[in-house]
Structure formats: C-alpha cells, structure tokens
C-alpha cells in the first residue's frame, strides 16, 4: 500500500537554538515545506530584529533552500503599532504566540494576567496577525488536568467574544472540551493537534510506571479525550490541522527529578500521523489535515510537490543526536507501520 500526498507543513514547531539547531532543522525540513517556529527561546523572541536573526540561523544550517521557516513573536505588552507595522512587511512573519506565565518551557516571561492583553489583541486584529495560544490556565488552584478546559471557559471564550475578527489558533489541543469549543466557534478559530496527543493517553504516561519521555505540556489526558482528538483530526474538518509541537530536550533533562516537558517527534511525525489516520479508517483525510487545512487558515498557497509513504515496518532509533547530547524520539525502539520513500529532501 502506498500513499502520495501534497507535501505537508508543520504549523507548530520548536527548533530550539545553538548546537541542536542543525539536528532539529534537518528533521523538520526533510519532510515539511513550511513550519511555524515557536519563539520561546531563552531569552524569547520579542522583536523583528531577533526574529530575522533566528530565521537566518535556521536557514544557515538548512540544506534545503526550499524550506520556509515562518516566524512568530513572543506575546508581550511591548507589542506596539509601529512594531506590527514593521513586522507585517515580512512575508514570513505570521503570528504572535501567547503563553500564560509558567506553564511550559521558557514561559516564565509569559503573560501573568490575561486581562492585561486586550490592547495587544486589538492591534493583532487590526493588522490581521494571527494569535497562537498555549491554552492553559496558570493559576495554582487549577488542577493540571483541568488547565485547558479552564482556560477555554475563563479566558478564550471572552477573548473570542471581544475580538470576533481575530484569527486564533488554539495550539496542541488535548481535550474534548477544546474539540467542541473549536468546532462551535467561528471560522476564525482553529486548532493544531500533535501526533503524541493522538497516540497516547495519561495511562501511557502514568499507568505503568512513569514514562518521562511522554511528559509534555499540555499533559496527556484521558482516553475519551484522545478519541475526541482522533475524530476531529481525521474528520477532514478545515478547523483542525497538523502541528507537531516537536520539542526536544536532552535525555538528561527528561530523566531527572524535575523533568522537562516536551516530546521530540519530528523525525517520525508524518509516519505517526499516517498510522493514526489508517487505524481510524480515514487515511484519505490525511492530506487535508497535513497539507491543506493549515495553509488555508494562514492564507498561504498549497504546496506543489508531494511525498510518498508506503506501508513497510521499520524500527525508530532508541536515541538520536541532539547537538552535543542525545534525545529519545517519540516511538523510540518501537515499530512503525509507515515509511517515507519519496520526497524526503535529504537524510
Ligand atoms: Zn509548543
């Protein structure tokens, strides 16, 4: 069995910086034509000058001149009219990413009180810049498994009511509440879904010993939630599209007394998605999810070349190089049913 689809894009990706960049870029640019690059470096990407510098560093290590990194700025109250006027001149500038403070890697610079953000949202709406949201409440009284649902009810709902023309991507959704919120919202609201939230539930993380390499933010949820995500992703609905949230950490940072959140999936992402869509009996919708819906939401052209996958089992490496250290990719040491045979730009 073989499957040819339009070359996909990754609408949510962490490439990190420094020595690891060559490895993360290779994994992403090998398959994806474009990727939305997250700005949560240390320090975060706040200005267009910093985004230009980061983008050049990515292109410097990238063997493919076709790969198009799309840049984002880290949401902050220093986002002004003149900054956005400058930013929208660049075709690769696509969005601003909002992190509630303290919920994930390098989010300590994030917004502490979401009610303070309305001024910036008004500007984003005016300049037609997309708002990408890490949708988790950061209050200590909110249970870690309830953060997303709480955020939707208390912050996102009011935000969408106040800014009906603002295009928002609720990133890496994890719950059935998120699925139904996005489905019942206007066409300005969409969501990315990761391969790991389609493959795993919290039993996989916690039910048979602690599996630190499955620890991510937002944390894995219940089987009912996972099933709702699979249904949404594989339905072909234009509001849901591919975003890996691939977020590598060295093994020592994951296997630790306070392990970092993040799963490195880009080396196996498209194969893993194919497996999920096949199991759901919806392989024919993979192309919409991976290669069409996101481009349309971002008002960008659909890619013109293709990749081909065949059903041929292979074993994912136990460890992969990550700059000066090593990382355990998603599905490490496990068999995967699909393999890319045409269209990988370089291996
Ligand atoms: Zn992310």
Image (spheres, rainbow, N blue to C red):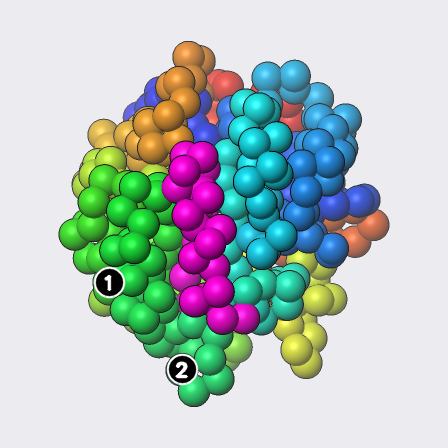
> What is the quadrant of residue 47 in the picture?
top right
The quarter of the image holding the N terminus is top left
Q: Which mark is residue 38?
A: none
For the question of whether residue 161 can be seen, the reply is: yes
| Residue at horizontal 52 percent and vertical 45 percent from the top | 96
Q: Position of residue 200 (x, y in %)?
A: 38, 61
Q: Residues within 10 Å of mark 1 (few under 14, many from 20)?
A: some
Residue matched to label 2: 142
What SS does tag 2 mark? loop
> What is the quadrant of residue 82 in the picture?
top right
Q: Position of residue 105 (x, y in %)?
A: 62, 62
Mark 2 or mark 1, which has the lower sequence index? Answer: 2
Residue 114 highlighted magenta (yes or no): yes
Mark 2 lies within 8 Å of ligand 1 (Cβ measured): no
Q: Nearer the viewer, residue 279 or 196?
A: 196
> Compared with residue 100, is residue 193 higher up or lower down, i.e. above or below?
above
> Compared with residue 85, is residue 109 higher up or lower down, i.e. above or below?
below
Determine whether label 2 and label 1 are within 8 Å by CB: no
Q: Is residue 338 left or right of residue 83?
A: left
Q: Nearer the viewer, residue 44 or 47?
A: 47
For the question of whether residue 190 can be seen, the reply is: no
The quarter of the image holding the C terminus is top right
Nearest to viewer (mark 2 / mark 1): 2
> Compared with residue 196, is residue 21 higher up or lower down, i.e. above or below?
above
Image: magenta residue range: 112-136
| Residue at horizontal 67 percent and vertical 58 percent from the top | 249
Q: Position of residue 264 (x, y in %)?
A: 58, 51
| Residue at horizontal 56 percent and vertical 32 percent from the top | 85
Q: Residue furthest left?
A: 184
Q: Residue furthest bottom?
A: 141
Residue matched to label 1: 176
| Residue at horizontal 27 percent and vertical 61 percent from the top | 157
């Amino acid at each position: 069995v073989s499957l040819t689809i339009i070359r996909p894009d990754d609408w949510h990706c962490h490439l990190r910086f420094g020595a690891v960049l060559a490895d993360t870029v290779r994994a992403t640019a090998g398959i994806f034509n474009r990727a939305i690059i997250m700005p949560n470096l240390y320090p975060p990407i706040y200005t267009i000058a910093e985004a230009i510098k980061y983008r050049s560093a990515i292109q410097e290590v990238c063997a493919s001149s076709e790969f198009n990194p799309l840049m984002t700025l880290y949401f902050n109250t220093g986002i002004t009219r003149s900054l956005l006027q400058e930013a929208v001149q660049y075709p690769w500038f696509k969005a601003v990413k909002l992190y509630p403070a303290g919920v994930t890697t390098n989010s300590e610079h994030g917004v502490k009180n979401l009610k303070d953000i309305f001024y910036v949202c008004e500007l984003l709406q005016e300049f037609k810049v997309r708002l990408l949201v890490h949708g988790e409440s950061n209050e200590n009284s909110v249970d870690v498994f309830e953060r997303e649902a709480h955020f939707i009810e208390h912050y996102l709902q009011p935000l969408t009511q106040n800014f009906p023309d603002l295009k928002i991507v609720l990133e890496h959704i994890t719950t059935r509440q998120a699925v139904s919120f996005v489905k019942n919202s206007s066409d300005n609201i969409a969501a990315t879904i990761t391969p790991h939230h389609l493959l795993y539930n919290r039993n996989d993380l916690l039910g048979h010993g602690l599996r630190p390499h499955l620890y991510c933010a937002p944390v894995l949820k219940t089987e009912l939630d996972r099933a709702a995500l699979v249904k949404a992703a594989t339905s072909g609905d234009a509001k849901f599209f591919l975003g890996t949230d691939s977020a590598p950490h060295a093994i020592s940072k994951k296997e630790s007394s306070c392990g970092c959140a993040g799963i490195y999936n880009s080396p196996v992402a498209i194969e893993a998605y194919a497996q999920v869509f096949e199991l759901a009996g919806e392989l024919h919708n993979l192309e919409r999810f991976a290669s069409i819906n996101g481009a349309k939401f971002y008002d960008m052209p659909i890619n013109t070349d293709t990749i081909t996958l065949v059903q041929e089992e292979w074993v994912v490496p136990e460890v992969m190089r990550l700059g000066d250290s090593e990382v355990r990719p998603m599905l490490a040491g496990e068999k995967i049913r699909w393999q890319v045979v045409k269209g990988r730009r370089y291996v």
